[in-house]
Amino acid sequence: SLGLKQDAFPGEWNEIKTRPTETGNHQLYCAEYCGQGHSQMLGSVEVVPEDEYDDYLVEQWLSAQS
């Protein structure tokens, strides 16, 4: 639903950026048949308001300090 597609290769680092316009959960799935395990290549991205994300980052930083 985010309209993104990025090829991934074993042992390589890939990065893809987007600027979502709506909050919510977005399903990730493998878009090309890639062999055994293809149908299990799933994930999700949760888009939250910026202030909620900022709070999350502060919480993570504080928990790393203790």
Image (spheres, helix red, strand yellow):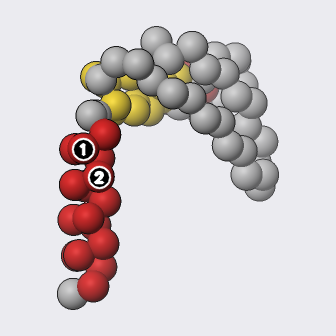
Q: Which of 32 and 37 lies nearest the eye of the viewer?
A: 32
Secondary structure at badge 1 equals helix
Q: Is residue 12 left or right of residue 18?
A: right
Q: Which of 28 and 57 lies nearest the eye of the viewer?
A: 57
Image location (x, y in percent) of residue 35: 70, 26
Image location (x, y in percent) of residue 38: 60, 26
Which numbered circle lies on residue 51? 1
Amino acid type at circle 2 is Asp
Image location (x, y in percent) of residue 18: 56, 29
Secondary structure at badge 2 equals helix
User: Which residue position is annotated with label 2?
Assistant: 54
The span from disc 1 to disc 2 (Cα, nearest Å) is 5 Å
Pointer 1 local density, CA inside 10 Å: few below 14, some 14–19, many at least 20? few
What residue is drawn where x is 74% and y is 30%?
A: 7
What residue is drawn where x is 30% and y is 23%?
A: 23
Q: Which of 42 and 45 lies nearest the eye of the viewer?
A: 45
> Going by the picture, which residue comes out furthest to the front?
51
* Image height of 64 relative to 2, above or below: below
Q: Is residue 24 left or right of residue 39?
A: left
What residue is drawn where x is 30% and y is 72%?
A: 61
